[in-house]
Image (spheres, rainbow, N blue to C red):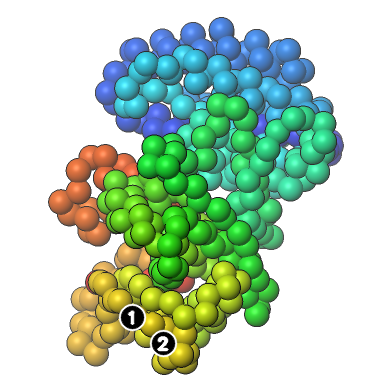
Amino acid sequence: MSETRKLVAILAADIAGYSRLVGADEDRTLARLRALRSDLIDPAISVHHGRVVKRTGDGFLIEFRSVVDAVRCAIEVQKGMVERNAGLPPERRIEFRVGIHLGDVVEASDGDLMGDGVNIAARLEGIADRGGICISRQVLDQIEGKLDLSYRELGRQNLKNIVKPVEVYGILFDTAVVPGSQFLTTVNLKQEIRYCKAPDGVRLAYATVGTGPPILRSAHWLGHLEYDWELPIARHFLLGLANDHTLIRYDARGNGLSDWDVDKISLDAWVSDMETVADAAGLTRFPLLGFSQGCAVSIAYAVRHPERVSHLILYGGFAAGTNKRPDVTTADRERFAAMKTLVKQGWGADNPAFRQIFTSMMMPTATNDQEDAFNELQRLSGSPECATRYLETGLPG
């Protein structure tokens, strides 16, 4: 079988929540998908000179000779979906996630494509928002200045089964919505996200929102500066803090908009990150809110810098994680080992089955909306590898 190598733009797309749509109404979902392909998707692919490499039940892989064409095709489809979803309740919307990468691929004699170029596009699709488009740095370099678009940095992402971290960007077109922005607009607030660098080179994302005296909220696992505002369990808490303060938050290393690919995950690293953010935000003396895992970090920071902490507020903290407690049993360790295996295998999967198990453990009385939002937060906030390392470092039981 002959194979050839070539450099192409690869577009990968799938439908978010496809299994749920089919489970609720299979005939209607499949009929709508067939109509979308004939009326919107296939014409857009043809106009922008794409070649369909393969189709799956809920997605497709497309090759383009031009990166510009690939991005234009993706935007046309996503804008078209916004129009077609208008007026539909969220549970009935068909929403695509799209990833685009420019890379070297191997083409088989039957036209199939293989290699890292394809794998990276598929992983970018996996971390895209519903209705969103994620692109690699290689794509941005080719389209910047050629298309009238805005972008948001998503940092270096450690994508599953990809050896090196990939620098990722989200495309902002006129129908795209940054997670949390609609809620912030309704309450007349604007969040500003900036970046700073820890002593070991890890890039940390931090945000400021609100007006008034500053308050710094600690970072913790399962955080995302933008998507946190989408969480029904978090948004009103954050709003209360921002109503009469300038709220400063940051994503922990390995989480959210901060770098996912990091060497060190430890208490010392977390305290150093808090120092970096406090300095970058220009804080001199301020109240410090420690939350969950961040309680221990906040206490350690206050011990090191008592002159800078005016008040120390702790909520939901713990002295030792599940695997670090002196009374842990053999059965506890076995359950913990099983949990780590499940995290490695299921955390980043499109099917939220495992994440639903984790959500039920964390929030046993959550409503359906709260569960769905928390399932999505898990997917967006970090990689399976990083989630496993946080578990090993010691999280609450």
Q: Residue at x 58, y 12 (%)?
A: 40
| Residue 383 appears anywhere in the view | no
Which mark is first along the chain, 2 or 1?
Answer: 2
**Identity, as a three-letter code, of the amino acid under mark 1:** Leu
Q: At label 2, which amino acid type do we have?
A: Ala
Q: Which mark is residue 380?
A: none
State which quarter of the image contains the N terminus. top right
| Cα separation between marks 1 and 2 | 8 Å
On screen, residue 277 versus residue 1, left or right, reads: left
Instruction: Name the residue that disc number 1 marks.
Output: 312
Q: Residues within 10 Å of mark 1 (few under 14, many from 20)?
A: some
- Mark 1 in CB contact with mark 2 (< 8 angstroms): yes
Which residue has dot 2 on it? 302
Say if 45 sits above or below 196 in the image. Answer: above
Q: Is residue 186 left or right of residue 260?
A: left
Looking at the rendered image, the quarter that the C terminus falls into is bottom left
